[in-house]
Image (cartoon, rainbow, N blue to C red):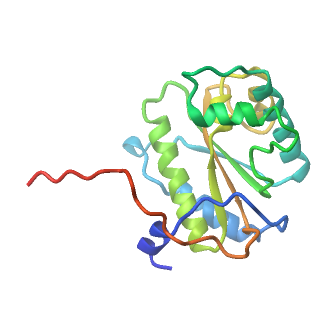
Amino acid sequence: MEAIDAIMTRRSTRKYKAEMPEKDIIEKVIEAGRYAPSGSNSQKTHFIVFTEKNLLTKMAELVKGEFSKMETGADTYVSLRNSINASKTTSYVFHYNAPIFIVVANKKGYGNAMADSSCALENMMIAANALDLGSCWINQLHWLDENENIRAFLKEYGLGEDETITGGLILGYPEAGLPDRKPLERKGNPVTWVE
């Protein structure tokens, strides 16, 4: 798949098969993230890859429990509010039961932490599409970055004390077989030319 096609046809996947992709395919996706640009070529983005089903279940239960303790208000960011409200239902699984969850972290206090991590996440989503995998950017752990229980859990699996959770990515084979590649109409993201 050509690079432009992989970008233009990338869509978020929220229904996955339980089947685990081959490790070399997962590694290709991660390498795409590792090769993303970073401020001053600092390469500070950290990837923590979860593939163990029991750990993913434990993480999902922990996230659901922590969100269910939170309250929302009119000023709560809509996606965060949706997650908090959904966590109060029995069916809420923040990672859509994908077989792979990549936690992305970066250094606390580093001015380019979010930008570098965002580039890495985008690279991985494009690579996943090119490799016939579904993917979806997951923000719930980022929103819970300062939660002691979430941080304690992730520290057990490699999150550094000096790191902030900047995002997450789920991967796997789409339930439908191949990723949905029908481009969404662009209704926003205006372009202003100054010539």
Residue at screen point 66% across, 61% down: 13
Residue at screen point 86% across, 37% down: 61
> Count of labels shown?
0
The quarter holding residue 81 reads: top right
Q: Position of residue 118 (x, y in %)?
A: 50, 46
Residue at screen point 54% across, 22% down: 75
The quarter holding residue 51 reads: bottom right
Q: In the image shown, does 175 or 119 lie closer to the viewer?
A: 175
Q: Say if residue 43 shows up in the picture.
A: no
Indicate left or right for 61 with 124 as reference. Answer: right
Q: In the image shown, does 182 or 41 lie closer to the viewer?
A: 182
Quarter of the image where the C terminus is located: bottom left
Residue at screen point 55% across, 43% down: 45
Q: Position of residue 182 (x, y in %)?
A: 53, 72
Indicate left or right for 80 with 94 as reference. Answer: left
Q: Position of residue 141 (x, y in %)?
A: 68, 35
